[in-house]
Protein backbone atom coordinates (compact mmCIF):
# COMPACT_ATOMS: atom_id res chain seq x y z
CA UNK A 1 0.00 0.00 0.00
CA UNK A 2 1.33 3.43 -0.99
CA UNK A 3 0.41 6.64 0.77
CA UNK A 4 1.48 9.79 -1.07
CA UNK A 5 1.54 13.08 0.84
CA UNK A 6 2.22 16.38 -0.92
CA UNK A 7 3.80 18.88 1.47
CA UNK A 8 5.79 17.41 4.33
CA UNK A 9 5.89 18.32 8.03
CA UNK A 10 7.76 21.64 8.12
CA UNK A 11 7.32 22.68 11.76
CA UNK A 12 7.79 21.01 15.12
CA UNK A 13 4.74 20.45 17.35
CA UNK A 14 2.34 21.78 14.71
CA UNK A 15 -0.50 19.43 15.59
CA UNK A 16 -3.03 22.26 15.88
CA UNK A 17 -1.83 23.87 12.63
CA UNK A 18 -0.72 21.75 9.68
CA UNK A 19 -1.56 18.62 11.64
CA UNK A 20 1.72 16.68 11.35
CA UNK A 21 0.21 14.12 9.01
CA UNK A 22 3.71 12.96 8.02
CA UNK A 23 4.24 11.58 11.51
CA UNK A 24 0.81 9.95 11.67
CA UNK A 25 1.18 8.34 8.23
CA UNK A 26 4.79 7.34 8.94
CA UNK A 27 3.77 5.67 12.20
CA UNK A 28 0.91 3.86 10.43
CA UNK A 29 3.15 2.67 7.59
CA UNK A 30 5.86 1.38 9.90
CA UNK A 31 3.33 -0.42 12.10
CA UNK A 32 1.39 -2.04 9.24
CA UNK A 33 4.18 -2.58 6.70
CA UNK A 34 2.94 0.07 4.22
CA UNK A 35 4.88 2.84 2.51
CA UNK A 36 4.71 6.63 2.69
CA UNK A 37 6.02 8.96 -0.01
CA UNK A 38 6.29 12.51 1.29
CA UNK A 39 7.21 15.30 -1.12
CA UNK A 40 8.28 18.89 -0.55
CA UNK A 41 9.99 21.53 -2.63
CA UNK A 42 11.90 22.92 0.37
CA UNK A 43 15.05 20.98 1.34
CA UNK A 44 14.81 22.40 4.87
CA UNK A 45 11.26 21.03 5.26
CA UNK A 46 12.42 17.58 4.12
CA UNK A 47 15.40 17.76 6.49
CA UNK A 48 13.15 18.57 9.45
CA UNK A 49 10.58 15.99 8.39
CA UNK A 50 13.33 13.34 8.36
CA UNK A 51 14.31 14.25 11.91
CA UNK A 52 10.70 14.23 13.12
CA UNK A 53 10.00 10.81 11.62
CA UNK A 54 13.34 9.12 12.22
CA UNK A 55 11.74 6.17 14.01
CA UNK A 56 9.58 5.44 10.95
CA UNK A 57 12.20 6.18 8.29
CA UNK A 58 12.30 2.62 6.91
CA UNK A 59 8.69 3.04 5.83
CA UNK A 60 9.15 6.47 4.23
CA UNK A 61 10.61 7.80 0.99
CA UNK A 62 11.39 11.53 1.25
CA UNK A 63 11.36 13.42 -2.04
CA UNK A 64 12.70 16.94 -2.49
CA UNK A 65 11.17 18.58 -5.53
CA UNK A 66 8.06 19.91 -7.18
CA UNK A 67 5.12 17.71 -6.39
CA UNK A 68 3.28 18.07 -9.70
CA UNK A 69 6.42 16.85 -11.40
CA UNK A 70 6.73 14.04 -8.86
CA UNK A 71 3.09 12.98 -9.23
CA UNK A 72 3.29 13.05 -13.02
CA UNK A 73 6.21 10.64 -13.08
CA UNK A 74 5.37 8.43 -10.07
CA UNK A 75 5.39 4.86 -11.30
CA UNK A 76 3.39 3.18 -8.53
CA UNK A 77 -0.27 3.03 -7.65
CA UNK A 78 -1.55 5.50 -5.09
CA UNK A 79 -3.82 3.98 -2.45
CA UNK A 80 -4.12 7.05 -0.25
CA UNK A 81 -3.47 10.47 -1.75
CA UNK A 82 -3.15 13.34 0.71
CA UNK A 83 -2.89 16.80 -0.86
CA UNK A 84 -1.60 19.37 1.64
CA UNK A 85 0.76 21.72 -0.19
CA UNK A 86 0.03 25.31 -1.30
CA UNK A 87 -1.08 27.36 1.70
CA UNK A 88 -4.65 28.61 1.62
CA UNK A 89 -5.28 32.17 2.95
CA UNK A 90 -7.99 32.26 5.58
CA UNK A 91 -9.00 35.83 4.76
CA UNK A 92 -10.96 37.21 1.80
CA UNK A 93 -8.34 39.91 1.29
CA UNK A 94 -6.09 37.61 -0.71
CA UNK A 95 -8.23 36.42 -3.66
CA UNK A 96 -5.23 35.74 -5.90
CA UNK A 97 -3.53 33.52 -3.31
CA UNK A 98 -6.80 31.71 -2.74
CA UNK A 99 -7.26 31.10 -6.45
CA UNK A 100 -3.65 29.93 -6.76
CA UNK A 101 -4.09 27.41 -3.92
CA UNK A 102 -7.31 26.06 -5.47
CA UNK A 103 -5.82 25.73 -8.94
CA UNK A 104 -2.70 24.15 -7.50
CA UNK A 105 -4.76 21.48 -5.76
CA UNK A 106 -6.58 20.80 -9.01
CA UNK A 107 -3.27 20.42 -10.88
CA UNK A 108 -2.03 17.98 -8.22
CA UNK A 109 -5.21 15.94 -8.64
CA UNK A 110 -4.74 15.92 -12.42
CA UNK A 111 -1.12 14.77 -12.09
CA UNK A 112 -2.07 11.95 -9.69
CA UNK A 113 -5.19 10.86 -11.56
CA UNK A 114 -3.85 7.90 -13.56
CA UNK A 115 -2.20 6.39 -10.45
CA UNK A 116 -5.51 6.18 -8.60
CA UNK A 117 -7.75 3.12 -8.68
CA UNK A 118 -11.24 2.19 -7.57
CA UNK A 119 -10.15 1.55 -3.98
CA UNK A 120 -8.05 4.68 -3.61
CA UNK A 121 -8.79 7.24 -0.92
CA UNK A 122 -8.32 10.95 -1.63
CA UNK A 123 -7.89 13.27 1.35
CA UNK A 124 -7.70 17.03 0.75
CA UNK A 125 -6.71 19.64 3.30
CA UNK A 126 -7.89 23.21 3.92
CA UNK A 127 -11.58 22.82 3.22
CA UNK A 128 -14.43 24.65 4.94
CA UNK A 129 -12.87 28.11 5.09
CA UNK A 130 -15.20 31.14 5.04
CA UNK A 131 -13.67 32.11 1.68
CA UNK A 132 -14.40 28.69 0.16
CA UNK A 133 -11.06 27.14 1.05
CA UNK A 134 -8.69 25.21 -1.14
CA UNK A 135 -11.04 22.45 -2.27
CA UNK A 136 -13.58 24.60 -4.14
CA UNK A 137 -12.41 23.36 -7.57
CA UNK A 138 -11.73 19.73 -6.67
CA UNK A 139 -15.35 19.43 -5.56
CA UNK A 140 -16.02 18.52 -9.17
CA UNK A 141 -14.60 15.08 -8.33
CA UNK A 142 -18.28 14.32 -7.76
CA UNK A 143 -18.89 14.76 -11.49
CA UNK A 144 -16.26 12.12 -12.25
CA UNK A 145 -17.47 9.15 -10.21
CA UNK A 146 -16.00 10.02 -6.82
CA UNK A 147 -18.15 10.10 -3.70
CA UNK A 148 -17.58 12.50 -0.81
CA UNK A 149 -17.59 10.68 2.54
CA UNK A 150 -16.62 13.60 4.74
CA UNK A 151 -16.41 17.36 4.23
CA UNK A 152 -15.05 19.17 7.25
CA UNK A 153 -11.67 20.86 7.59
CA UNK A 154 -10.57 18.11 5.25
CA UNK A 155 -12.50 16.39 2.48
CA UNK A 156 -12.41 12.65 1.97
CA UNK A 157 -13.35 11.00 -1.33
CA UNK A 158 -13.72 7.38 -2.40
CA UNK A 159 -14.80 5.90 -5.72
CA UNK A 160 -18.53 5.28 -6.04
CA UNK A 161 -18.69 1.48 -6.44
CA UNK A 162 -21.95 1.74 -8.42
CA UNK A 163 -20.04 3.37 -11.27
CA UNK A 164 -17.49 1.64 -13.46
CA UNK A 165 -14.04 3.02 -12.64
CA UNK A 166 -12.50 5.36 -15.21
CA UNK A 167 -8.77 6.04 -15.03
CA UNK A 168 -9.04 8.80 -17.62
CA UNK A 169 -8.04 12.25 -16.43
CA UNK A 170 -10.68 14.94 -17.11
CA UNK A 171 -7.99 17.34 -18.37
CA UNK A 172 -7.37 19.40 -15.23
CA UNK A 173 -3.63 19.54 -15.91
CA UNK A 174 -4.08 22.36 -18.43
CA UNK A 175 -4.74 24.95 -15.68
C1 LIG B 1 1.08 22.78 5.12
S1 LIG B 1 2.71 22.23 4.76
C2 LIG B 1 2.57 20.48 4.79
C3 LIG B 1 2.28 19.96 6.17
C4 LIG B 1 2.34 18.46 6.33
N1 LIG B 1 1.52 17.75 5.33
C5 LIG B 1 1.90 18.06 7.71
O1 LIG B 1 0.81 17.47 7.86
O2 LIG B 1 2.62 18.34 8.66
C6 LIG B 1 2.82 22.61 3.06
C7 LIG B 1 4.16 22.27 2.40
O3 LIG B 1 3.95 22.17 0.99
C8 LIG B 1 5.14 22.56 0.34
N2 LIG B 1 4.87 22.91 -1.07
C9 LIG B 1 4.14 23.95 -1.53
N3 LIG B 1 4.12 23.97 -2.89
C10 LIG B 1 4.85 22.88 -3.29
C11 LIG B 1 5.20 22.34 -4.55
N4 LIG B 1 4.80 22.90 -5.70
N5 LIG B 1 5.95 21.22 -4.60
C12 LIG B 1 6.37 20.63 -3.45
N6 LIG B 1 6.07 21.11 -2.21
C13 LIG B 1 5.32 22.21 -2.13
C14 LIG B 1 5.66 23.73 1.18
O4 LIG B 1 7.06 23.87 1.00
C15 LIG B 1 5.26 23.31 2.61
O5 LIG B 1 6.34 22.75 3.31
Image (cartoon, rainbow, N blue to C red):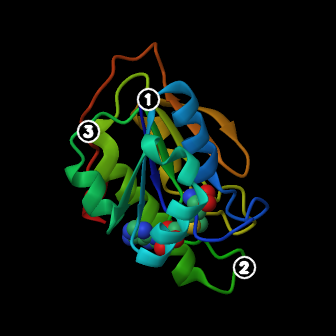
Q: Quadrant of the C terminus?
A: bottom left
Q: Is residue 32 left or right of residue 74?
A: right
Mark 2: few, some, or many residues within 10 Å (few <14, many ≥20)? few
Q: Residue at x 45, y 13 (%)?
A: 162
Would residue 18 be seen by someone viewing this image from the given angle?
A: yes
Question: Residue lying furthest front in this view?
Answer: 55
Which quadrant of the structure image shows residue 11?
bottom right
Q: Quadrant of the N terminus?
A: top left
> Which one is closest to the eye, mark 1 or mark 2?
1
Would residue 101 be seen by someone viewing this image from the given angle?
A: no
**CA gap, disc 3 to disc 2?**
34 Å
Q: Secondary structure at mark 2?
A: loop
Identify the residue position indicated by label 1 in the image.
120
Question: At which x and y percent is residue 64?
Answer: 35, 67
Answer above or below: position of 103 versus 4: below
Identify the residue position indicated by label 3 in the image.
114
Q: Is residue 117 left or right of residue 59?
A: left
Question: At which x and y percent is residue 166?
Answer: 29, 27
Q: Residue at x 73, y 46 (%)?
A: 152
Mark 3: few, some, or many residues within 10 Å (few <14, many ≥20)? some
Identify the residue position indicated by label 2 in the image.
91
Question: At which x and y percent is residue 159?
Answer: 46, 25
Mark positioned earlier in the residue sequence (1 or 3): 3
> Which one is closest to the eye, mark 3 or mark 2?
3
Answer above or below: position of 159 versus 38: above
Mark 1 residue CB less than 8 A from any atom of ligand 1: no
Q: Secondary structure at mark 1?
A: loop
Q: Secondary structure at mark 3?
A: helix
Answer above or below: position of 128 versus 13: above
Amino acid sequence: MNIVETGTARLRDDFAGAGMATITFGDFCKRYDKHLWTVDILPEAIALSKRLTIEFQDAITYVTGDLVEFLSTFSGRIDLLYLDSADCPDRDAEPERLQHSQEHQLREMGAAWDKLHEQSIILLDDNDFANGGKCALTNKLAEHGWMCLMADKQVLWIWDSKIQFRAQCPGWTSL
